[in-house]
Amino acid sequence: MAARALTPVAFGNLAILLAVGSMGGVLSDLGQQTALAHVTAEGTLLARPLLLSVIRRRLVQSTAGIAVIVVLYQFASSHSTLLVPLLFAGSIVGTVVYSTEIAALTAIGRAQGDGANEALSRLGVLVVGWWWLHHGGGLLAAVGVYVAADVASAVTVSLLVRRHWTASSPVADERRFRIRHTAPLAFALTAAVVYARIDTWLLGQMQGPVLAGHFAAADKILDAVLLAPATLGALSIAQVSPLPLERRWRRIKLLLRLAIGFSVVPAVVIGIFAHQVIGGLFGPNFRSTGPVLLVLLISVMPGAVVAACSPITAVLARWRFARAMAGGLVVNVGLNLLLIPHLHAEGAAWANLASEMLLAAWMLVLLSRLTTARPSG
């Protein structure tokens, strides 16, 4: 809807803002949310003091993320105003609050709130966003809808979490929440988010917001195709970790077959009608982005491996997974810098394909070594 209602430049600026918002927003976490979920699950209760302590810590950390968002947006967008990225800061604050509370609720088996909030907030974005954009709201309206949804989620989930928390707190070692302890996960998460969104920012910085918007549109279709592998990845820890060592690799291969099967078939269908699909979804002006979408769809198989394997690899490999993500990021950025000046948005797609293939191979090697029993002696 934003692609159809906004000018190409405004839509490109929105795509850049969402990309840098993801990259800056990850600085508000640094492993705190995962550490809270783990401690909460161990104690089987949602402790109010512990939850509020993590939220406060994350809110302080979010100031660095907001500063990064402002700077990166100024570099890559066509705007000189600070109003757009500063308005988006409200989304970062809201996300910090409700995502921390959702993680704690899920850790005690209360995932219903997460499902309801995700569905209702997205429906609200669609309805309010459609009305506002079609009444001349422009870029600020598009950003404002995201902010309103995240702030509303923070208020709603905060009211819900009060029904389940307890005033007492489990005895938790504070060292488990220090950056030194959460560093592997924090580093890997930061590298993974930057890896996934750096292409759009680099295109905006090097070629302008219009091409960034076109690439982001094609990349959004790729995200949809990889939704099933990402869902399997979210289940991978529960499916693999409880198993004895000799059965883990077999289960991982099953998850990989499902991930590839669920993603390759729609990728082939969409690839046959690439120009019609992207033009039909985002408007006639985007039909020229069909070749970019085709290249991105070629990366579906390694992308499915990365999406399905990342969570379980992060748990089992820790620093080795972090180094793998850092290596993929370096390759991705290097290829983007090399290819974008010559091939533009299509160059970013080829860079994504090459780095996904490398990262998928790296993860498979790591997992096969960590989950294959070896004879002793």
Image: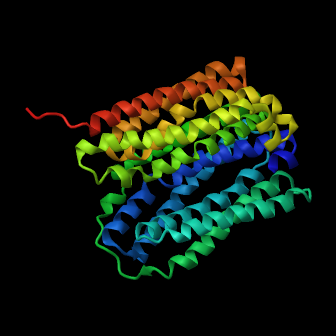
| 310 left or right of 67 in image | left
Using the image, determine if residue 208 lies above or below residue 85.
above
The residue positioned 45% from the left and 39% from the top of the image is 257
- Indicate the quadrant where residue 294 lies: top right
Q: Residue furthest top?
A: 342
Using the image, determine if residue 260 lies above or below residue 234.
above
Q: Looking at the picture, how far across and down is residue 36, in whole percent?
A: 40, 63
| 120 left or right of 275 in image | left
Q: Looking at the picture, how far across and down is residue 324, in whole percent?
A: 41, 33
Q: How many marks?
A: 0
| 288 left or right of 151 in image | right
Colour scheme employed for the rendering of this structure: rainbow
Q: Is residue 179 visible?
A: no
Q: Is residue 224 visible?
A: yes
Q: Looking at the picture, how far across and down is residue 349, in whole percent?
A: 65, 28
The residue positioned 34% from the left and 37% from the top of the image is 367
Using the image, determine if residue 281 lies above or below residue 328.
below
- Indicate the quadrant where residue 135 lies: bottom right
Residue nearest the observer in this picture, 148 or 110: 110
Q: Residue furthest right?
A: 135
The residue positioned 74% from the left and 61% from the top of the image is 125
- Indicate the quadrant where residue 250 lies: top left
Q: Looking at the picture, how far across and down is residue 176, in whole percent?
A: 32, 58
Image quadrant containing the C terminus: top left
The residue positioned 31% from the left and 71% from the top of the image is 43
Residue nearest the observer in this picture, 306 or 172: 306
